[in-house]
């Protein structure tokens, strides 16, 4: 039996229930930190880390988002020197204020690309340096260095995805490994 989690968000004053995730979405979300581990000397990877956007002077509605307190990318990457810190070993952070260097969003079958691109605009506004949009059904990745500047890579044409801003290269075959999961 497959169980899907549900996420609630508002779109233009309407509350929408969006079923998130799928088998391929989950697989790729688990693979990305494993593959990014090759860059552990420079970066630290997090999955579904809540980014605190509740600051008084921050209005994300300009991007068509009705998110008041947090953004939660599928995967994000911090330079090791700027990893969010906590002072007490038993304390944990529910939300972090530090902005990651890289955000990765994986399109699930029930999401719209438009919504993820709106999130990218917000991420860049907050100071994220690079955003990746992974589309599992097309076996493609678009690497955005600015909201309207991207390079696209797909498994049929390319061997690897290249992020020139952060100097990261990952083999597409390992990201989209097909067959039995």
Image (cartoon, rainbow, N blue to C red):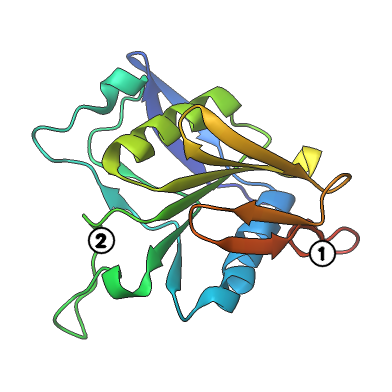
Q: Position of residue 28 (x, y in %)?
A: 67, 57
Q: Quadrant of the C terminus?
A: bottom right
Say left or right for 8 vs 131. left
Instruction: Name the residue beneath numbered marker 1.
Output: 181
Q: Around disc 2, counting alpha carbons within 10 Å, would you say few (fewer than 14), some (14 to 19), or many (20 or more)?
A: few
Q: Earlier in the sequence, mark 2 or mark 1?
A: 2
Give above or below for 120 relative to 175.
Answer: above
Q: Around disc 1, counting alpha carbons within 10 Å, would you say few (fewer than 14), some (14 to 19), or many (20 or more)?
A: few
Which structural element holds mark 2?
A: loop
Answer yes or no: is residue 112 visible: no
Residue situated in front as seen by the camera: 2 or 78: 78
Q: Position of residue 113 (x, y in %)?
A: 59, 28
Say left or right for 49 vs 173. left
The CA span between labels 2 and 1 is 31 Å
Residue at image coords 54%, 23%: 114
Say left or right for 179 vs 65. right
Give above or below for 41 relative to 25.
Answer: below
Answer yes or no: is residue 162 visible: yes
Q: Position of residue 51 (x, y in %)?
A: 30, 51
Which structural element holds mark 1?
A: loop
Q: Quadrant of the N terminus?
A: bottom right
Q: How many marks?
A: 2
Residue situated in front as seen by the camera: 96 or 8: 96
Say left or right for 64 vs 37. left
Q: Quadrant of residue 16?
A: top left
Q: Which mark is residue 102?
A: none
Give above or below for 13 relative to 81.
Answer: above
Residue at image coords 64%, 51%: 3
Q: Which mark is residue 94?
A: 2
Q: Position of residue 110 (x, y in %)?
A: 63, 32
Q: Quadrant of residue 150?
A: top right
State the residue lying farthest toward the left: 56
């Amino acid at each position: 039996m497959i169980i899907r989690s549900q996420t609630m968000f508002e779109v233009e004053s309407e509350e929408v229930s969006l079923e998130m995730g799928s088998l391929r979405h989950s697989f790729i979300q688990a693979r990305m930190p494993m593959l990014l581990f090759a860059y552990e000397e420079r970066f630290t990877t997090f999955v579904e880390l809540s980014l605190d956007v509740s600051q008084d002077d921050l209005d994300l509605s300009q991007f068509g988002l009705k998110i008041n307190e947090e953004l939660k990318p599928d995967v994000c990457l911090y330079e090791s020197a700027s990893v969010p810190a906590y002072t007490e070993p038993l304390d944990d952070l529910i939300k972090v204020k530090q902005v990651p260097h890289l955000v990765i969003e994986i399109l699930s079958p029930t999401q719209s690309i438009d919504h993820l691109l709106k999130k990218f605009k917000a991420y860049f506004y907050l100071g994220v340096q690079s955003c990746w949009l992974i589309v599992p059904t097309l076996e493609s990745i678009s690497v955005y260095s600015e909201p309207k500047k991207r390079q696209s890579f797909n498994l049929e044409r390319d061997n690897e995805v290249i992020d020139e801003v952060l100097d990261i290269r990952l083999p597409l075959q390992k990201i989209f490994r097909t067959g039995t999961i």
